[in-house]
Amino acid sequence: MKENRVYKLLYTIIYPFFLLLYPIKVIGRENIPDGPAVICPNHTRAIDPFFVVFAFRRKNIMRIMAKIELIRIPVLGWLLRHAGIFGVDRGAADIGAVKTALRHLKEGRKLLLFPEGTRVSEGESVEAKTGAAMFATRTGSPLLPVYITPHKRMFRRNLVVIGQPFEPKFEGRKCTAEELRAVADELMARIYALGEEQQ
Protein backbone atom coordinates (compact mmCIF):
# COMPACT_ATOMS: atom_id res chain seq x y z
CA MET A 1 0.00 0.00 0.00
CA LYS A 2 1.39 3.37 -1.07
CA GLU A 3 0.38 5.08 2.20
CA ASN A 4 2.43 2.58 4.19
CA ARG A 5 5.52 3.16 2.05
CA VAL A 6 5.29 6.94 2.38
CA TYR A 7 4.57 6.63 6.11
CA LYS A 8 7.66 4.47 6.65
CA LEU A 9 9.81 6.73 4.49
CA LEU A 10 8.81 9.84 6.44
CA TYR A 11 9.28 7.95 9.69
CA THR A 12 12.81 6.93 8.72
CA ILE A 13 13.74 10.47 7.65
CA ILE A 14 12.23 12.40 10.57
CA TYR A 15 12.82 9.96 13.43
CA PRO A 16 16.56 10.53 14.12
CA PHE A 17 16.29 14.32 13.94
CA PHE A 18 13.21 14.48 16.15
CA LEU A 19 14.67 12.20 18.80
CA LEU A 20 17.87 14.22 18.80
CA LEU A 21 15.82 17.27 19.80
CA TYR A 22 13.18 15.49 21.89
CA PRO A 23 14.35 12.18 23.36
CA ILE A 24 11.42 9.99 24.41
CA LYS A 25 11.02 7.68 27.38
CA VAL A 26 8.23 5.18 26.71
CA ILE A 27 6.37 3.24 29.39
CA GLY A 28 3.84 0.53 28.54
CA ARG A 29 4.81 -0.35 25.00
CA GLU A 30 3.80 -3.94 25.79
CA ASN A 31 0.19 -2.72 25.97
CA ILE A 32 0.01 -2.04 22.24
CA PRO A 33 -2.44 -4.55 20.71
CA ASP A 34 -1.56 -6.38 17.51
CA GLY A 35 -4.79 -5.57 15.71
CA PRO A 36 -6.87 -2.44 15.29
CA ALA A 37 -7.12 0.11 18.07
CA VAL A 38 -8.24 3.68 18.60
CA ILE A 39 -5.14 5.42 19.96
CA CYS A 40 -6.18 8.32 22.20
CA PRO A 41 -3.57 10.71 23.69
CA ASN A 42 -3.97 13.97 25.54
CA HIS A 43 -3.02 16.99 23.44
CA THR A 44 -1.02 20.04 24.52
CA ARG A 45 1.38 20.78 21.64
CA ALA A 46 1.31 20.65 17.85
CA ILE A 47 4.20 18.15 17.88
CA ASP A 48 2.26 15.58 19.94
CA PRO A 49 1.58 13.27 16.95
CA PHE A 50 5.33 12.78 16.51
CA PHE A 51 5.67 11.65 20.12
CA VAL A 52 2.96 9.05 19.64
CA VAL A 53 4.13 7.77 16.26
CA PHE A 54 7.74 7.40 17.41
CA ALA A 55 6.75 5.88 20.76
CA PHE A 56 4.84 3.17 18.89
CA ARG A 57 7.79 2.47 16.59
CA ARG A 58 7.88 2.01 12.84
CA LYS A 59 6.13 -1.37 12.71
CA ASN A 60 2.91 -0.02 14.26
CA ILE A 61 1.67 1.94 11.29
CA MET A 62 -1.30 4.12 12.14
CA ARG A 63 -3.77 6.26 10.29
CA ILE A 64 -4.05 9.75 11.76
CA MET A 65 -7.12 11.97 11.90
CA ALA A 66 -5.96 15.60 11.65
CA LYS A 67 -7.71 18.93 11.36
CA ILE A 68 -8.70 19.65 7.76
CA GLU A 69 -6.73 22.91 7.76
CA LEU A 70 -3.47 20.93 7.66
CA ILE A 71 -4.60 18.83 4.72
CA ARG A 72 -5.45 21.98 2.75
CA ILE A 73 -1.92 23.40 2.98
CA PRO A 74 -0.21 23.11 -0.43
CA VAL A 75 2.54 20.48 -0.64
CA LEU A 76 2.25 19.58 3.06
CA GLY A 77 -1.33 18.44 2.57
CA TRP A 78 -0.34 16.28 -0.39
CA LEU A 79 2.42 14.68 1.65
CA LEU A 80 0.15 14.06 4.62
CA ARG A 81 -2.57 12.46 2.50
CA HIS A 82 -0.06 10.15 0.86
CA ALA A 83 1.16 9.08 4.31
CA GLY A 84 -2.34 7.98 5.32
CA ILE A 85 -3.30 11.10 7.25
CA PHE A 86 -6.84 12.30 6.60
CA GLY A 87 -8.62 15.49 7.52
CA VAL A 88 -11.70 16.16 9.59
CA ASP A 89 -13.73 19.36 9.57
CA ARG A 90 -14.08 20.06 13.28
CA GLY A 91 -16.76 22.67 12.70
CA ALA A 92 -19.20 20.36 10.95
CA ALA A 93 -20.56 16.83 10.97
CA ASP A 94 -17.88 15.39 8.69
CA ILE A 95 -19.47 12.14 7.52
CA GLY A 96 -16.62 11.47 5.09
CA ALA A 97 -14.02 11.53 7.87
CA VAL A 98 -16.20 9.27 10.02
CA LYS A 99 -16.52 6.73 7.22
CA THR A 100 -12.77 6.83 6.60
CA ALA A 101 -12.00 6.24 10.28
CA LEU A 102 -14.45 3.33 10.51
CA ARG A 103 -13.06 1.77 7.34
CA HIS A 104 -9.48 1.84 8.62
CA LEU A 105 -10.49 0.13 11.87
CA LYS A 106 -12.62 -2.49 10.11
CA GLU A 107 -9.64 -3.26 7.86
CA GLY A 108 -7.48 -3.90 10.92
CA ARG A 109 -5.52 -0.66 11.13
CA LYS A 110 -4.69 1.52 14.10
CA LEU A 111 -6.28 4.96 14.25
CA LEU A 112 -4.76 7.94 16.07
CA LEU A 113 -6.96 10.82 17.13
CA PHE A 114 -6.97 13.31 19.97
CA PRO A 115 -10.27 12.91 21.85
CA GLU A 116 -10.13 16.44 23.25
CA GLY A 117 -10.37 17.71 19.68
CA THR A 118 -7.90 20.55 20.21
CA ARG A 119 -4.78 21.47 22.14
CA VAL A 120 -5.42 21.94 25.85
CA SER A 121 -3.02 23.84 28.11
CA GLU A 122 -1.87 22.22 31.32
CA GLY A 123 -4.29 22.93 34.13
CA GLU A 124 -7.18 23.46 31.74
CA SER A 125 -9.79 20.90 30.78
CA VAL A 126 -12.29 20.45 27.99
CA GLU A 127 -15.03 17.92 27.51
CA ALA A 128 -13.80 15.12 25.27
CA LYS A 129 -15.49 14.56 21.94
CA THR A 130 -17.36 11.26 21.63
CA GLY A 131 -15.87 10.29 18.26
CA ALA A 132 -13.28 7.88 19.66
CA ALA A 133 -15.94 6.13 21.73
CA MET A 134 -18.22 5.85 18.72
CA PHE A 135 -15.46 4.41 16.51
CA ALA A 136 -14.62 1.81 19.15
CA THR A 137 -18.20 0.73 19.78
CA ARG A 138 -19.09 0.61 16.08
CA THR A 139 -16.10 -1.59 15.17
CA GLY A 140 -15.39 -3.53 18.36
CA SER A 141 -11.90 -2.01 18.47
CA PRO A 142 -10.26 -1.29 21.83
CA LEU A 143 -9.55 2.22 23.05
CA LEU A 144 -5.89 2.76 23.92
CA PRO A 145 -5.25 5.65 26.35
CA VAL A 146 -1.90 7.41 25.96
CA TYR A 147 -0.44 10.15 28.15
CA ILE A 148 2.14 12.60 26.79
CA THR A 149 3.95 14.85 29.23
CA PRO A 150 2.70 18.42 28.68
CA HIS A 151 6.17 19.93 29.21
CA LYS A 152 8.15 19.15 26.07
CA ARG A 153 11.83 19.77 26.81
CA MET A 154 14.50 19.81 24.16
CA PHE A 155 17.49 17.52 24.72
CA ARG A 156 15.85 15.92 27.78
CA ARG A 157 13.72 12.81 27.87
CA ASN A 158 10.00 13.38 27.43
CA LEU A 159 7.57 10.85 28.84
CA VAL A 160 4.98 8.89 26.85
CA VAL A 161 2.87 6.39 28.81
CA ILE A 162 0.81 3.80 26.93
CA GLY A 163 -2.03 2.46 29.03
CA GLN A 164 -3.88 -0.81 28.85
CA PRO A 165 -6.47 -1.11 26.08
CA PHE A 166 -10.08 -1.35 27.09
CA GLU A 167 -13.22 -2.15 25.15
CA PRO A 168 -16.44 -0.26 25.76
CA LYS A 169 -19.28 -2.44 27.01
CA PHE A 170 -21.71 -1.65 24.21
CA GLU A 171 -20.15 -3.38 21.16
CA GLY A 172 -22.48 -4.70 18.52
CA ARG A 173 -25.21 -2.08 18.78
CA LYS A 174 -25.69 1.61 18.29
CA CYS A 175 -25.09 3.43 21.56
CA THR A 176 -27.06 6.28 22.98
CA ALA A 177 -25.49 9.72 23.27
CA GLU A 178 -25.38 9.28 27.04
CA GLU A 179 -23.52 5.98 26.75
CA LEU A 180 -20.96 7.47 24.35
CA ARG A 181 -20.47 10.41 26.71
CA ALA A 182 -19.81 8.01 29.60
CA VAL A 183 -17.20 6.13 27.55
CA ALA A 184 -15.51 9.39 26.48
CA ASP A 185 -15.36 10.57 30.09
CA GLU A 186 -13.90 7.25 31.23
CA LEU A 187 -11.31 7.43 28.46
CA MET A 188 -10.11 10.88 29.52
CA ALA A 189 -9.96 9.79 33.15
CA ARG A 190 -7.77 6.85 32.16
CA ILE A 191 -5.50 9.07 30.07
CA TYR A 192 -4.79 11.55 32.85
CA ALA A 193 -4.51 8.80 35.45
CA LEU A 194 -1.49 7.51 33.50
CA GLY A 195 0.26 10.83 34.09
CA GLU A 196 -0.68 10.93 37.76
CA GLU A 197 0.78 7.46 38.27
CA GLN A 198 4.20 8.76 37.17
CA GLN A 199 4.32 11.67 39.62
Image (cartoon, rainbow, N blue to C red):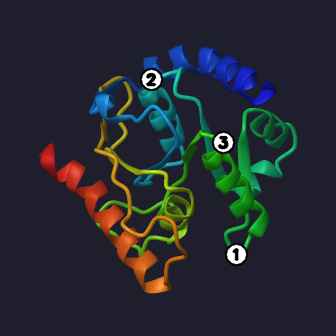
* Between 156 and 141, the one nearer to me in the picture: 141
* Between 92 and 59, the one nearer to me in the picture: 59
Up-down relation of residue 115 to residue 113 (above or below): below
Looking at the rendered image, the disc whose residue lies closer to the viewer, 3 or 1, is 3
Q: What residue is shown with label 2?
A: 21
- Tell which circle, 2 or 3, labels the residue nearer the N-terminal end: 2
Q: What residue is shown with label 3?
A: 107
- How far is mark 2 from mark 3, CA to CA? 35 Å
Q: What residue is shown with label 1?
A: 91
- The location of residue 8, given as percent across then percent down, is 65, 20
Residue drawn at (45%, 23%), measured in percent from left and top? Answer: 21
Q: Quadrant of residue 25?
A: top left
- The location of residue 41, given as percent across then percent down, is 42, 50
Q: Residues within 10 Å of mark 3 (few under 14, many from 20)?
A: few
- Tell which circle, 1 or 2, labels the residue nearer the N-terminal end: 2
Residue drawn at (61%, 15%), measured in percent from left and top? Answer: 12
Residue drawn at (44%, 17%), measured in percent from left and top? Answer: 20
